[in-house]
Image (spheres, rainbow, N blue to C red):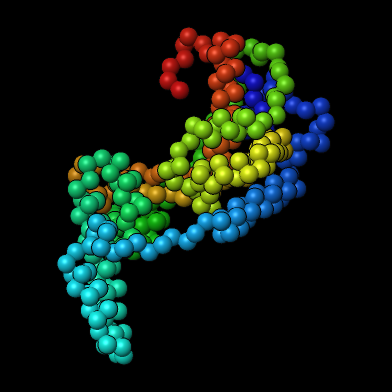
Amino acid sequence: MLLPPCLPYAPEHSTAPNDLSVIRRGVTAHESIDKSLNLFNQAIDKASCCTLKPNRTPDPRGVRWWNDACSVAHMLAWTTPAGRQRHLAARNLRNTLAKAKRVWAHEQLNEAVDAQDIWCLAKARKGHRTNLFPPLRNADNVLIDNLEQKVDIFRSKFFPGELRQVLTHHDMDHAPIQPREWAPITTEDVSAALRTTTNRSAPGPSGVGYKLLKWAHAANPTTIPDLLDRCLWEGVHPWKEATIVVINKPQKPDYSVPKAYWPIALMECVGKLLEKIVTKRINADIERFNLLPMTQFGS
């Protein structure tokens, strides 16, 4: 199977450029691409600040968490004379709104039927909840309620310290096929990959989602293809960080054990875009040259 020379698994029959100086897997390549990626993100941030309007404060009486207590506090804040009483009324309004949001979000999450309900609530919830997770049991079977210690428990459960080694070659591997040249990524490749994405996908740590990438690609169609091509030929994948969201598994008898939860990684959309393009090309070669053996099951 033909793979670009930058991937971790690059067998002897993969195509590599004749000029070995192109493949620079050292610090220089990482720094160069990281700098280009930072400039790309800064340009998106600057363009967003110049063109997008800030979120307007919605009419409080039109939101779902609004209740009678909010109406009373809102009326008092507007009718109380200026001075100390107005200040106290404004503080009471803020506290009442925050409490109404927390109570509404708590009730909605408890009545959620499936994961789709939870994801729909993610962008509607604005309040804070004091106990997002119940106490967890550590290795000594002691209940832990400290946030930092909970993070350590989840980290040891989801991310073991010793990584399992994966062999890149096996005795049952097929004979290598004739290599072919890896074509550069074109603007149409990026456009086709972006068409398969949804704007509702949660972004990674940078906050750049697919909607911003579509705008950036429409404004300058050569920037994203050039950046992805450099990553492939330099052998660098700069999107190494992700935001981990922990969600409880439904209908578990005991939520004090870490195995009652699963992690969801929110990765950078630019990195997922590159993986979409590479996967599409590999799948096309698999179907065209009949590379999938009859003994293959699953993905």
Closer to us: 149 or 274: 274
Q: Quadrant of the C terminus?
A: top left
Task: Tell me, yes or no, if residue 38 can be seen here.
Answer: no
Image side of residue 37 versus residue 292, left or right: right
Q: Quadrant of residue 190?
A: top right
* Residue 133 at x, y percent in the picture: 29, 56
Q: Answer left or right for 166 relative to 129.
A: right
Q: Nearer the viewer, residue 259 or 226?
A: 226
Considering only vertical position in the picture, is 272 above or below 286?
below
Residue at position x 59%, y 26% in the image: 168
Place residue 78 in its image quadrant: bottom left
Q: Is residue 125 left or right of residue 113?
A: right
Q: Position of residue 24 (x, y in %)?
A: 76, 40
Q: Which one is nearer the viewer's eye here, 133 or 187?
A: 187
Quarter of the rendering occupied by the N terminus: top right
Q: Is residue 111 visible?
A: yes
Provide residue 75's location: percent of width, then percent of height. Answer: 22, 75
Residue drawn at point x = 54 percent, y = 47 percent: 212
User: From the viewer's perspective, is residue 74 above or below residue 177?
Assistant: below
